[in-house]
Image (tube, helix red, strand yellow):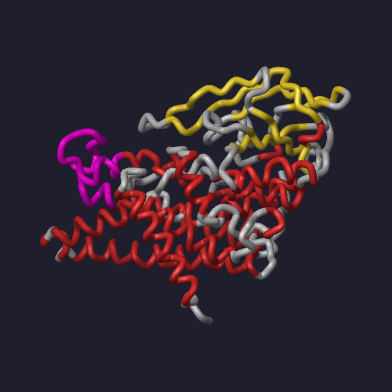
């Protein structure tokens, strides 16, 4: 097995790295954990688009670069190393565009794909609800048919980027009372339509990136139905692998890793402490294992296979690494690591405390670890569920 990259891939990596270094030095963004998720910048997204770095795996007929998923993984590893603002284009480019290419009508492809790849419009995902998190089949937002339209009522929660987005990719019930896994559909909804209310949700560190979205008699034309009616559950399942298998599940708090290594190098007592050295070495090993898992997902995808189990394994391992990293750096710095941003001489600019408060969500967002274990068991090990006897 060859773990090396081609000369062209290494050149591409350096090109991306130099671009990000220049942008950071010019003040476009700061290198801080979770920054890519917290910030939305149409201007920065359009810089990436101008370089052909959005939709690079899409077919050329839709404006894409027809490049490999391995190339995109290299790009995302460098991106997550620097943490620039990505939210303006992120969901549209990562999974909505590929979903439209696979399931969308010709009209939908013409209307949205070019705008997504040029960072002219922004999307968010409307899946989770107050009573339906990892269990997508439990959603209750309803789209009732009236002539050529759907009338939508319900609520979504934890909707990242809804306050900046132009459209929401909405999963709704279109056959109330129908079979549990054959009653949902996917619809593209313009967030400027009457009857939509977006309310901010602030996380524990006071950052607004999540939202609640309410729908009250929202009228959407049927032409915005994506794919087949009532086949939405299976469409969603085919799309989540784009969300689970990437470097964003390994490197959301990567600046902590670099910061910890720098602190240890500069502190003689820490550098010579066998416990610290052992824990840092373990993190080094797990980071490299995580990289291999993510690149394996990209390789599997390039072979034309759907990486169900591979993406689940990768996310389960990688998000646990992120939590371990946060725990280690918090322990390493002790009380100094608990100082929030904004205070003089705060270690790593307060990144430690912020990341530690973020960390419980790492193994929840995009599918909980428990759900992933089920995917691994059923799709990876071919195990089946059996009902327990009373």
Outermost residue to the front: 50
Residue 176, position in %: x, y? 81, 29
Q: Tell which of 335 and 163 is nearer to you.
A: 163
Report whether residue 291 is seen: yes
Against 354, residue 54 (above or below) is below
Residue 239, position in %: x, y? 67, 50
Q: Is residue 330 magenta?
A: yes
Residues in magenta?
A: 329-353
Rendered image quadrant of residue 38: top left
Residue 185, position in %: x, y? 77, 38
Seen at 58% across and 44% down, the residue is: 91
Rendered image quadrant of residue 208: top left
Secondary structure mostly seen in magenta is helix
User: Is 168 displayed left or right of 71 in the figure?
Assistant: right
Report whether residue 335 is seen: no
Outermost residue to the left: 268
Seen at 59% across and 50% down, the residue is: 94
Seen at 81% across and 25% down, the residue is: 144
Q: Tell which of 156 and 360 is nearer to you.
A: 156
Against 383, residue 129 (above or below) is above
Outermost residue to the bottom: 1
Rendered image quadrant of residue 158: top right
Q: How many marks?
A: 0
Residue 50, position in %: x, y? 52, 51
Seen at 58% across and 46% down, the residue is: 118
């Amino acid at each position: 097995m060859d773990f090396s990259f081609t000369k062209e891939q290494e050149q591409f990596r350096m090109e991306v790295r130099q671009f990000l270094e220049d942008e950071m030095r010019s003040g476009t963004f700061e290198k801080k954990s979770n920054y890519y998720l917290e910030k939305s910048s149409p201007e920065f997204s359009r810089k990436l688009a101008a370089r052909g770095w959005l939709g690079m795996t899409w077919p050329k007929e839709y404006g894409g670069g027809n490049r490999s998923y391995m190339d995109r993984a290299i790009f995302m590893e460098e991106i997550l190393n620097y943490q620039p603002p990505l939210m303006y284009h992120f969901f549209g480019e990562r999974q909505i565009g590929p979903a439209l290419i696979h399931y969308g009508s010709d009209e939908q492809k013409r209307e949205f794909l070019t705008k997504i790849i040029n960072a002219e419009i922004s999307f968010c995902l409307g899946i989770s609800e107050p009573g339906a998190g990892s269990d997508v089949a439990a959603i209750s937002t309803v789209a009732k048919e009236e002539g050529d339209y759907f009338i939508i009522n319900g609520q979504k929660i934890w909707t990242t980027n809804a306050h900046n987005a132009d459209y929401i990719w909405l999963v709704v019930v279109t056959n109330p009372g129908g079979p549990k896994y054959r009653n949902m559909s996917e619809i593209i909804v313009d967030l400027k339509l009457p009857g939509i209310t977006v309310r901010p949700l602030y996380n524990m560190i006071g950052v607004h990136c999540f939202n609640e979205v309410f729908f009250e008699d929202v009228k959407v034309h049927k032409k915005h139905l994506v794919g087949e009616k009532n086949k939405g559950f299976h469409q969603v399942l085919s799309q989540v692998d784009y969300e689970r298998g990437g470097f964003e599940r390994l490197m959301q708090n990567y600046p902590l890793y670099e910061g910890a290594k720098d602190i240890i190098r500069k502190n003689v007592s820490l550098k010579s402490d066998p416990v610290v050295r052992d824990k840092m070495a373990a993190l080094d090993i797990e980071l490299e294992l995580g990289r291999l898992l993510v690149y394996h997902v990209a390789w599997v995808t390039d072979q034309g296979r759907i990486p169900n189990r591979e993406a689940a394994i990768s996310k389960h391992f990688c998000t646990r690494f992120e939590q371990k990293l946060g725990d280690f750096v918090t322990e390493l710095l002790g009380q100094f690591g608990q100082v929030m941003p904004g205070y003089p001489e705060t270690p790593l600019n307060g990144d430690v405390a912020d990341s530690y408060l973020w960390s419980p969500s790492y193994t929840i967002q995009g599918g909980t670890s428990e759900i992933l274990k089920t995917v691994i068991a059923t799709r990876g090990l071919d195990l089946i569920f059996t009902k327990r006897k009373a």
